[in-house]
Image: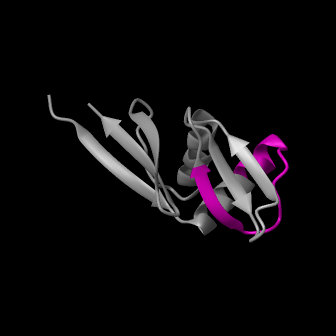
Amino acid sequence: MATEIRKIGFSLEEVKAALVAYANRTGRKVPKRPIHSIEEETGGRIVLYFGEDKSAHVGLSAREMITVLLVFCQDHKLPVPRSAKKALKLEGNILTLMIRSV
């Protein structure tokens, strides 16, 4: 059976917009400063650093970060199949949502 693989890349600004939209729905606090960088820790945890001094940061599990990006996709009418397998990949300062459908 054929497999479809899609990649949706999110810039730092889009990740921030996604995080703000998610925070508005869940009541989570998000720093007001722009995201300066993103790092992936061992175990897949995603850490977003805000401001050039990186003093403020938010850490999310890969699963929660995928949910954040899916909210953004839904708000921007980007179709993502529910049944597809989803994973994250950090490519420089682009956070990529990998989508695999069978």
Residue under the point 58% across and 34% down: 63
Residue 11, placed above or below residue 39: below
Q: Which residue is the extreme one toward the left?
A: 1
Please state which of residues 97 and 2 is positioned toward the viewer in this rendering.
97
In this picture, is 23 found above or below 85?
A: below
Numbered range of the magenta stretch: 21-39
**Residue drawn 68% across the image and 54% down it:** 48
In magenta segment, residue 32 = yes
Q: Position of residue 45 (x, y in %)?
A: 61, 38
Whether residue 82 sits left or right of residue 69 in the image: it is left
Let me know if residue 30 is in the magenta part: yes
Q: Quadrant of the N terminus?
A: top left
Question: Which quarter of the picture shows residue 3?
Answer: top left
Q: Please give the count of numbered marks on the rendered protein.
A: 0
Q: Could you tell me residue 26's position as x and y percent?
A: 79, 41
Q: Quadrant of the C terminus?
A: top left
38 to the left or right of 98:
right
> Between residues 22 and 33, which one lies in front from this camera angle?
33
**Quarter of the image holding residue 25?**
top right
Measuring from the top left, give residue 33's x and y in whole percent: 79, 68
Residue 77: image location, x then y, percent: 50, 56
